[in-house]
Image: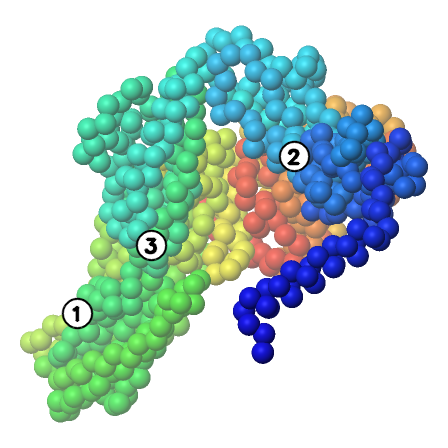
Amino acid sequence: MLTKTKKWLVAFVLAFVALLLVACGEKTPKQVAPEELTISVDVYVGDKVVLVGGEMYLSVEVKPENASKEVEWTSSKPEIAEVDANGKVTGKKGGVTVITATSKLDDSVKDTFEVKVLESLNPTAVLVAAMDSVKAQLPKYVDDDIELPSPANTLVTVEYYDVDGVKLANNIYRVNYVQDTYVQLECRLAYDGEEVKFPVTIQVVSDVEFNDFIAIEEAQAALDQFLQTYKDNKITADIDLPMTLTELYEALEDDTEVRQEVFLSWKSLGTHLVSIADEAAVYHRPNDDQNVRLEIVFLSGDNSGISRHDFVVKGYNKEEKLEYLLENVLIIPEEIQGQNIILPIGDSKFRTTITWESDDADTLGINGKMNPYLEEEKVVTLTATIVYDSSNNAFDFEEIIEFEITVKPAANDAQKLALDLSNQFEAEDFPHYFPYGMVEGNKIPLPFEVEEGDFEGTEITWTVNEEGLFDEEWVIQKQYLRYHEVLLTYSVTVGDDTATGQVAINVGVSKLDNTMYIGGNMYSRSGDQDQPWDELHQLKTSDGPNGKTGSNLNVYGWSGFTTYVDIDGVRYQWFHAGWYTSHADDLSKLTLTDENAIQGGLLSVSGHGGTNRQTLFVNDTDEDLKFPMAYHVAEIPENVTFELGLDKNADGSGLDRNGMAVDAYYFAMVADAEGKVIWTTGDTKIQNALKAQMEEEVGEGNPYVLPDYLEVPAGGFMICTRYAGPIGLQKIIFKEGLKFTIEKYEVAPQVG
């Protein structure tokens, strides 16, 4: 066994022997510095190109071959590309850098290698990135000359131009301060044969620490805080609007000092929900919750800013709608005796539909009619089904409500008869519609005694709630054009008892109460009337002004002609003025050519043409007629001719656009004998539409022929709206395929 001392001795001897063996072996050669060093590329994509994030591997070749290859790698622009100790190059951002390899044994021996770093192989992508780079570097405020930014990618060239297209030398913007203002420039970036141009804005100020723009930003921030409560909740009432930054801080109970006043101007983009008036946002409660946007302009000095805020305007929820209906529409009595009740089938506010069921229709029907001859008291349950449809289905609902009604027999025979008559007067043959001027005459056919039954021969007496409407013989004395409802009250006496009832009738020419009325002198084009085309007070003084009127000029009353069309549940009814009326057989003014074309102009009773008033042409013959059409010749090319040569009046004078002719400078529609629109250019001027059509057929600049007439079929009619016509209406009702109705009434003398 070896002792510890002997073990160390053996180890020492072995180590000594090993050293002797090494000393006796080959000598290690001494490293030689290279005389020449060349960088070579091991792996790369493209010609000395690497992408951002990509890699390139470099190595060196030396002379002599046995020289040391140990080198130190460096990059002239490591922010563009960096290189590690092994020669691996990594692209960092677009640009060019120089990679140097230096011998570690002799720093005078080196080589360089230029590397181009690309952001993308797509030039457009590079330009987009460069544009973002420039925008990110733009200063917010400028108060002195400044060199405008270049993109981070040095391969992209940049130039700046002012609004006049003058290039800024060395991309330096030189400040010529007058006031805080915006300056618009154009930046042009070029790369690899492609270019992009985009506007840039700098804000030139006297003080970058505080200026008009900062004042506006302070006001915008304060307004954001002021409006946040309404944005977090809903608009449920009028809002007092701050009109200055000072008022904003006061509303916020903020004692921040106002360094410069800022003025606010408010605008609503949904005035039917929130309107701006008297420094307040006026709340108009919609049926359902709706969104509205308010636009606020801030003014500081000569500069402005704008903010837009969206809100929810509170409408009515289901419970609130039902509460309103029960309080204002579904007013159903718990007990009735000898009377009918009104069962509404809808409401005008929420436009609900209401249908009814009765568990005893013989006693009280779903039309609200009671059995006049009921002998004993009964209890009837009426069931109302309420359906609400909204443009937003989330608010739709259906609700069923029951009403229990005690129905008692009529108290006496007079009440029974009055109730029976009420039911009879609901029939279609009762004159519920009786305007002045119908062909049936102007005496309303009211029944003045009971004609059959147990009470045959009983006298019926009548009164009306409008004084002067009828004379003693019940001949109507007034002519209304708008829908005009009056109440007739009838009375019957049986024995010692008298009972009464009422019937509502319409004595206006318009048959519907939701009619959009058209007529009168349209020069005014008043924008704030209740209805924008309604100036019927000019045609009939009995139809008073509708809202604010734009003109009080008379246009010689109503002609007796009315035309109407129903579109999406709305009736548009036109009452045509009677400035003058003439007929084609009046040979002193008009002649008929061999082509059935009406030749000649037409003058009014005052001796001049029809000026700019709209015209109704009615063909009540059994032949198609051609009505002359006059163009605004200044807008017609010289190489255009007209089909029939109807450009002269019967007396040889030039055809007047404002006389008998259709005015091609404006709009028209033609309807056949059934009232169907068969031709129109809508809200495009006739001559513009016809010119465009012909130029498309023959080619622009080539000669062509224009029709100088519009043909109206037998029994048909035509409406031409001139300058004084209802602007904007043509887009709605002048459409091919729509069905019009034309009616003629006797015209009552003007009253008042």
Q: CA distance from mark 2 to mark 1?
A: 102 Å
**x and y percent of residue 138 in the render?**
55, 26
Q: Residue 286 has which mark?
A: 3
Residue 606 is left or right of residue 293, and the answer is right
Q: CA distance from mark 1 to mark 3?
A: 41 Å
Which residue has dot 1 on it? 500
Which residue, as the protein is rendered here, is positioned at the far right?
A: 64
Name the amino acid type tagged 1: Thr
- Frontmost of labels 2 and 3 is 2
Q: Position of residue 432 (x, y in %)?
A: 36, 64
Q: Earlier in the sequence, mark 2 or mark 3?
A: 2
For residue 260, which numbered disc appears in the image? none
Vertical side of 114 occupied by 142: above or below = above
**In this orientation, which residue lies closer to the viewer: 29 or 744?**
29
**Could you tell me if the residues under marks 2 and 3 are in contact, i.e. CB atoms within 8 Å?**
no
Position of 501 compared to 575: left or right?
Answer: left
- The part of the image, by quadrant, that contains residue 158 is top right
The spot of residue 102 in percent (x, y) is 78, 32
* Label 1 SS: strand
Label 2: few (<14), some or many (≥20) within 10 Å? Answer: few
The percent position of residue 319, horizontal first and vertical second, equals: 25, 68
For residue 157, say whether it is visible.
yes
State the residue at coordinates (29%, 79%).
Answer: 400
Q: Residues within 10 Å of mark 1 (few under 14, many from 20)?
A: some
Colour convention of the picture: rainbow
Residue type at the position of mark 3: Pro
